Amino acid sequence: MRPDTLAPCDTSSMTGAFLGQRSTPLVSALAAAALFGAATPLCKPLLTELAPTTLAGLLYLGAAAALAPMALREGFPSVAQHGVNLARLAGVVVFGGVVAPVLLLAALARAPAGSVALWLNLEVVATALLARAFFREHLATRGVVAILLVCAASALLALPVHAGGAPGSALLLVAAACLCWALDNNWTSRIDAFTPAQSSFAKGLVAGSVNLALGLAGGDSLTPANAGLALGLGAACYGLSLALLVSAAQQLGAARSQLAFATASFWGVALAWLLLGEPVLPVQIAAGVLMALALALLSREDHGHWHQHSSVTHRHAHRHDDGHHTHTHPEGRPGQAHSHVHHHAAQAHAHPHRPDLHHRHPHGRGRRR
């Protein structure tokens, strides 16, 4: 299958209206990055009124509220035969929904927004390393070079003298958050029993409720103003961003979707310049150029060889012009992205592909191009 020919959006009208039905997975990942990147500088003022745990809870509850109509419209998935998917979703909720945002906001309370936004690039490195070492994702030469460019940009930006002199405690908190999100990224890219909206809704509802309860139990208090603003930021910057990123990761693979998502830090820095008055540094511009080169290499990566598909039944966003989805619909869905439970018979063939839900096989030497 060629994931770059698929619309990244499920049957969701929100994501479809935002990007259009024929937008590419890479565009979805970039849009998710812009939304998520904006959250860092926009949340900074709220940390003067709310504890990190409380704010994290409100952000994720806002995300759940935004995703609820989509998740409910897509029906209630059967979970009886999806133990592996439920285990992955539980890991996503705990590490990516409960722990990671609290660590990030704790760092944001201690350091400038631009500094924290730049350090979020560590998520790319952690995701790529986990994807390669433990989740069997291949990386062609261009992909490896792209990762090295992003790592170089991250190292350049992460120098404390350039990144605003962030204290060491804040940097450690960001690094821990990025490791949690790296696990989240790899697990979510392999969930094939629930749609992106459903998995993101579950993550937001459960993680948000847990963190808000912990924050209120710790003595934090809410006002209509700060609660409403936090919920709104969560709906816009986390809810839609989560749905777009999960969909892109299922089609591009965790490592590649995270390379595109790495631009979130630069969006955050740009808003920190504009809204918080933080200085524009030449090193930040240079790092942005390196990231742009990495994305250009990523978009040109190609990998193809003869491979075997096992029989599988799963659910994910797809179209019927990709060579893997030949089932029919009485109502007809020509060129339209949609989602439902469907079955794939075993087959063997050769074509260019990426490590999406259909291509998790190992590969040997001489199979990259």
Image (cartoon, rainbow, N blue to C red):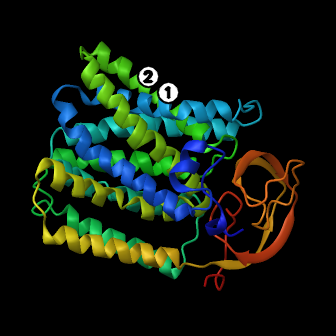
Q: Residue at x 68, y 70 (%)?
A: 2
- Residue 221 appears left or right of 141: left
User: Mark 2 sits on what residue?
Assistant: 209
Nearer the observer, 359 or 33: 33
- Residue 170 appears left or right of 241: left
Image coordinates for residue 322, horizontal then vertical, percent: 75, 66
Is mark 2 in CB contact (under 8 Å) with mark 1? yes
Nearer the observer, 257 or 178: 257
Q: Residue at x 49, y 26 (%)?
A: 206
Q: Residue at x 64, y 48 (%)?
A: 10
- Judged from the image, the secondary structure of the residue bearing numbered disc 1 is helix
- Judged from the image, the secondary structure of the residue bearing numbered disc 2 is helix
* Amino acid on which the number 2 mark rests in the picture: Ser
User: Mark 1 sits on what residue?
Assistant: 205
* Amino acid on which the number 1 mark rests in the picture: Leu
Query: Which quadrant, please, contains the C terminus?
Result: bottom right
Mark 1 neighbour density, 10 Å: few (under 14) some (14–19) many (20 or more): many
Query: Which quadrant, please, contains the N terminus?
Result: bottom right
Name above or below for residue 296 compared with residue 236: below
- Residue 298 appears left or right of 354: left
Nearer the observer, 83 or 26: 26
- Residue 109 appears left or right of 257: left
